[in-house]
């Protein structure tokens, strides 16, 4: 499905990307291409990320399809530049995140942290260069909201890093959820907000910002649950205060106090606690997606047009089981 639906979009995005890279030194361009060829990125050979139906270049595709929804007859070249700018920005942050979390990824092993950080800086620069063609009045608003959301996300990331050195018992589920809102909610809010703003639809842009925050938190909760099955991720080992981890710790304490579980081994109790926490977290993701569907309905009413199936899918709102 994804190869057929998004192939034409990917060709447009890749053509613009290659035009950007041709003016860089061969060594830097090759490292950037290597980073952008990682699973989920725009040059990846994999159509979708693992079995969770998330297409490669999700950031760029989401931005592109929001722009088309807001302004079907808008400047296609401008939409592609904005979309690729956001893809470069998010990939730059992903590079830094791998280093900050000391995740055992192929890119860290093959490039080294120093080169990976420099690629991140280069991607940030490319991101800015792509949007300099926007009209001057629009450019100011674009940069203002981009940096507003970005600063919020950076604060969430910093709190997440600080939390690693604090006891898990001191964190509540509400605090963990607040970090998810700051970290991931802000980033997806950024993408959705400025993608609509780039085509001068301020009312829709505000609604898309709200939609982005909701689906961003849902995506983060999904990702946190998968960390327990991903050997490359270090979040569980490092004691990240994710929502599912906090719930699992609370549930483990409850199980230990129940006489019916007194004869169970520690490992068995921990697995049971994780299972219970994962179910509860999945329920919360459904809540956020239900809220996102409500906002989507408001956007459709504002704009007088239904979301295309492709946009619903990119937002993670095409699952018929969402209540």
Image (cartoon, helix red, strand yellow):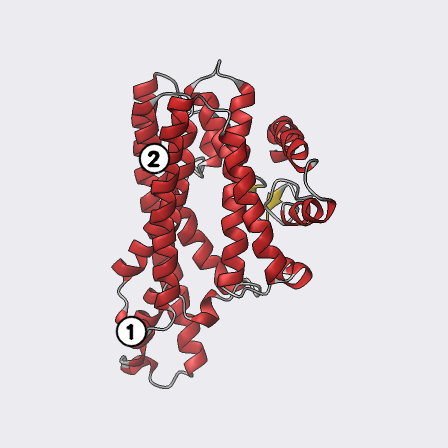
Question: Eyeballing the image, is 106 above or below 63?
Answer: below
Residue at left 32%, top 27%? Answer: 297
Question: Eyeballing the image, is 58 above or below 157?
Answer: above
Q: CA distance from mark 1 to mark 2?
A: 33 Å
What element does badge 1 sit on? helix
Residue holding disc 1: 169
Percent x, y for residue 255?
31, 76
Percent x, y for residue 88?
54, 41
Most distant residue in the bottom direction: 263
Picture quarter with the C terminus: top left
Q: Nearer the viewer, residue 18 or 238?
A: 18
Please give left or right for residue 21 compared with residue 117 in the image.
right
Residue at left 45%, top 35%? Answer: 318
Q: Nearer the viewer, residue 167 or 20?
A: 20
Q: Nearer the viewer, residue 221 or 66?
A: 66
**Quarter holding residue 307:** top left
Percent x, y for residue 63?
48, 32
Question: Eyeballing the image, is 81 above or below 261?
Answer: above
Would you call the spot at circle 2 few (<14 residues within 10 Å), some (14-19), or many (20 or more)? many
Percent x, y for residue 212?
37, 38
Residue holding disc 2: 209
Residue at left 51%, top 17%? Answer: 75
């Amino acid at each position: 499905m994804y190869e057929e639906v998004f192939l034409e979009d990917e060709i447009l995005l890749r053509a613009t990307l290659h035009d950007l890279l041709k003016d860089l030194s061969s060594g830097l361009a090759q490292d950037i291409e290597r980073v952008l060829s990682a699973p989920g990125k725009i040059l990846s050979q994999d159509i979708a990320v693992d079995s969770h139906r998330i297409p490669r270049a999700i950031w760029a595709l989401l931005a592109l399809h929001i722009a088309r929804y807001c302004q079907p007859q808008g400047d296609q070249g401008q939409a592609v530049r904005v979309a690729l700018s956001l893809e470069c920005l998010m990939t730059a942050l992903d590079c830094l995140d791998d280093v900050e979390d000391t995740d055992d990824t192929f890119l860290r092993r093959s490039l080294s942290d120093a080169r990976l950080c420099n690629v991140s800086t280069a991607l940030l620069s490319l991101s800015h260069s792509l949007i300099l063609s926007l009209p001057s009045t629009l450019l100011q608003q674009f940069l203002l909201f981009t940096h507003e959301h970005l600063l919020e996300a950076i604060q969430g990331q910093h709190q997440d890093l600080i939390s690693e050195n604090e006891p898990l018992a001191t964190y509540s589920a509400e605090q963990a959820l607040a970090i998810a809102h700051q970290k991931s909610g802000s980033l997806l809010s950024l993408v959705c907000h400025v993608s609509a703003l780039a085509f001068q639809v301020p009312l829709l842009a505000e609604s898309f910002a709200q939609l982005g925050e909701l689906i961003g938190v849902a995506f983060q909760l999904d990702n946190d649950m998968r960390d327990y099955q991903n050997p490359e991720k270090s979040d569980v080992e490092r004691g990240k205060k994710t929502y599912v981890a906090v719930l699992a710790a609370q549930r483990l304490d409850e199980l230990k106090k129940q006489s019916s579980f007194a004869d169970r081994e520690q490992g068995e109790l921990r697995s049971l606690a994780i299972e219970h926490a994962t179910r509860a977290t999945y329920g919360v993701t459904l809540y956020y997606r239900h809220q996102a569907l409500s906002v989507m309905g408001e956007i459709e009413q504002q704009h007088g047009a239904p979301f295309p199936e492709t946009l619903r899918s990119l937002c993670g709102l095409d699952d018929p089981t969402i209540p």
